[in-house]
Image (cartoon, rainbow, N blue to C red):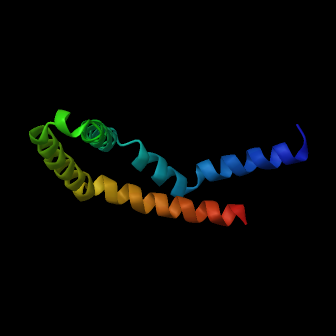
Amino acid sequence: MNAVESAARALGKAVQADPRYLAYHAAKNDAALQTAIQDFNLLRMNYQRETERAAEEQNTGKIQKLEQKIQERYLEIRENPHMAAFEAAKQEMDAMMREVDL
């Protein structure tokens, strides 16, 4: 292993040991939050699929229900304290990565 590879590995280990990385990793791996986000994304995909149909094939009732469910899920995610923790940890992690990138 050359000096550059050694330095890169050392940097990676230092990043992984940093409290900002640990907080980000923990927040990112919150199972309940990830399930809610996946459900939200699935609802958005179903909504998109339904709205891309020809006008005569669209089910307006289904579209309205999907819009309502998307809004409810979005609010649920935004109000989740784990989401706030994730966003704060991500901002800290992004700031650290900008420092490392300089």
Q: Quadrant of residue 94?
A: bottom right
Specify whether 85 is left or right of 71.
Answer: right
Residue 53, percent from left and from top: 26, 36
Quadrant showing the C terminus:
bottom right
Residue 14, percent from left and from top: 67, 52
Specify whether 25 is left or right of 100.
Answer: left
Residue situated in front as seen by the camera: 67 or 95? 67
Q: Which residue is found at the position 40% from the left and 49% from the top?
A: 27
Vertical order, 20 against 37 (above or below): below
**Residue projecting furthest to the right:** 2
The mark tally for this picture is: 0
**Residue projecting furthest to the left:** 61
Vertical order, 77 against 100 (above or below): above
Q: Which residue is found at the position 14% from the left and 36% from the top?
A: 59
**Residue projecting furthest to the top:** 57
Specify whether 13 is left or right of 39.
Answer: right
Quadrant showing the N terminus:
top right
Residue situated in front as seen by the camera: 51 or 81? 51
Residue 69, percent from left and from top: 16, 45
